[in-house]
Amino acid sequence: MPDIFVAKYKEVSKDQKRKRKDLTHFKNFIKRLTQYSPSSQKTDSNLKIFSTFCINPTGISFENKEEDEKILLFLRSHIITNFFWVLTTIILLLIPLFFVLLNSYSINPFSGVYLPIRFSSFFLILYYLIVITYALINFINWYFNSCLITDKRVIDINFSELVYKNVSTTKFDLLQDASYNQTGFLRSLFNYGDVLLQTSGSLENFDIRAVPHPDRVVHLVEGLLGRREDT
Amino acid sequence: MNILFFTQILESFVLFKIGFLLINILYVIFLFIIYNQVNSMDKIIIGDQGVSFIKLVSLLSIILAASLFLASVVIL
């Protein structure tokens, strides 16, 4: 009987050592993560307007933030995802100029239609306003679709079509697994992908789309999940 | 199509003017919705400098659209 007791004591001791080792490993991992920031080592500390991946963002907060809660990561879709609407906006902005250019070469596709100057100028202003609004809506959609990872939870902000706004929050206790998907030429070239955070039970999974450095995001979340299991 | 005839129809067509003003009004309301949404997002993410920029742009759009509406009421 005493032998069995001694054996048990040794097992616990090993387990504790492993936990300590894991915790040290996690601390080192966080330290390395904050140090390793290839895109901009100095500027990553503060959140900029076009920041898409920001470790330890300073100067921002969110609704219902706890006092001892620390934001570890701020995520937004990769800036390249804006390419198509930016291109569309540029084309739309250039269309009237294209007609002016055609007119200067005496080629007028609407030669049969004559609009008085007051009508055409109003149409032109309205047209440009609509184009600017189109760009603004797309920019807002990109800008507000963001995700915050704190040391306690994940906050996913979904904002689309101006009328749909969803703020989902889950604590790390409810997270089961983290994985990422990076398929396609553009995604490989610009290093961005979708991160899937699976929650337990019937809770909705978190799908963070087109975020830069998805491997690092998953690494961070796994580190936080590992810490949760240790404690 | 006779150019003069088309222009006369366009100018005298009251519905066209009303339609134009209606689109303008709807557009201003739409911009207000955008501004309101941006304002509400300001409470979710606090301290983000970009939100102020977007608010400014949407506010300028509202002013532009409202000016266009007023100008169209007077001129058209």
Image (cartoon, rainbow, N blue to C red):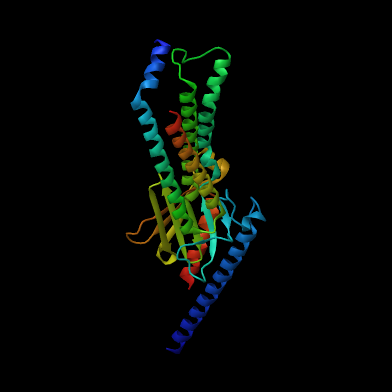
Residue B76, compared with residue A153, is above or below; it is: above
Residue B12, compared with residue B72, is above or below; it is: above
Who is closer to the viewer here, A34 or B41? B41
Is residue A41 visible to us here? no
Residue B13, image x and y in percent?
35, 23
Query: How many numbered marks, from 0 up?
Result: 0
Who is closer to the viewer here, A69 or A17? A69
Q: Examine the image and state in which quarter residue A94 appears.
A: top right
Is residue B64 visible to us here? yes
Quarter of the image for the N terminus of chain A: give it: bottom left
Q: Residue furthest bottom?
A: A2
Residue A156, image x and y in percent?
44, 56
Residue A10, image x and y in percent?
51, 81
Q: Examine the image and state in which quarter residue A202 appears.
A: bottom left
Residue at 52 percent of width and 77 percent of height: A16
Residue A124, compared with residue A141, is above or below; it is: above
Residue A175, image x and y in percent?
42, 62
Q: Residue furthest top?
A: B2
Q: Residue furthest left?
A: A202
Q: Residue furthest right?
A: A42
Residue A55 falls left or right of residue B75: right
Residue at 51 percent of width and 66 percent of height: A151
Residue A152, compared with residue B74, is above or below; it is: below
Residue at 36 percent of width and 30 percent of height: B19
Who is closer to the viewer here, A157 or A211? A157
